[in-house]
Image: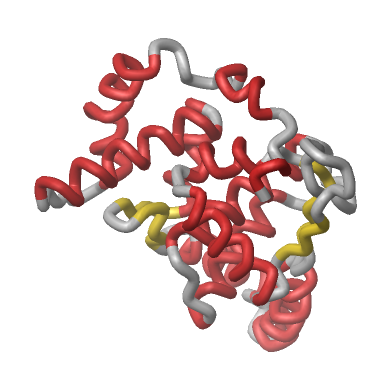
Amino acid sequence: MNYLELIVGFSRWKEVNPLPASAIALWHELVATCNKAGWPEDFTVPNAVLQANAGVSRKEFDRARQILIEQDLIAYKKSNRVNNAGRYKLVRLFKRDNDKNNSRDNEKDNETGNGRYNSINKDLNINKNINKYAEFVSMSEVEYQKLLDQFGDTFTQACITELDNYKGASGKKYKSDYRAILKWVVDKVKQKNNGLMKNESSFADLEDDDDYE
């Protein structure tokens, strides 16, 4: 599975299948977890960790997970053992959908000899699409991935939550939420969390959380 192809495919899909920000954030967390694990068919992860990383409340988390299940984006099986994490599975793998679409596009483009380059340009344009990662925070998939690469999942979600709360309370708007995060939110979150960046050990005590199902 190619991480970027999956992200691009999901971005295409939700253009015609709108999802709430909480469901989008949870899906990205599940994909990131699956990627770290080497793309197994299914995997376990404590729900409390997902909730914290996605920056959602318990109620929002439950609703977001149910939406993803109903949309056939994920499958979830609760553990039969108390305090053991349940198992998740990514059901819709968008690469397969994209392969079908790209195949039709390439057949048409190849007639003019420009299929390869048109396909590349199409993907680059898709990466410019702006997506919501919280109620008041939006950025492109590329910008979001840059934050993940630089700061890690936990710290990135903390920054998004910080900026979302600030914009929601103040009514402030930015030309680029991504630049705002780099300019001042990162320092603000560092001060608040004292070493949270790329360090998820703060959630170690939440390993087995299915007791809150």
Residue drawn at (64%, 52%) of the image: 4
170 on left or right of 104: left
Q: Quadrant of residue 61?
A: bottom right
Which of the two residues, 61 or 213, is positioned nearer the viewer here? 213
- Say if residue 169 shows up in the picture: yes
In percent of the image, x 38 and y 61: which residue is there?
130
Provide residue 45's location: percent of width, then percent of height.
73, 40
Query: How far across and how far down the image is residue 140, in percent?
Result: 41, 54
Residue 43 position, x and y percent, is 83, 45
State whether residue 24 is above or below residue 119. above
* Picture coordinates of residue 89, whole percent (x, y): 80, 57
Residue at x 38%, y 18% (from the top left corner): 193
**Residue toward you, 184 or 135:** 135
Q: Is residue 167 left or right of residue 192?
A: left
The answer to whether residue 62 is left or right of residue 150 is: right
Q: Residue at x 60, y 24 (%)?
A: 203
Q: Residue furthest top?
A: 194
Q: Quadrant of residue 65?
A: bottom right
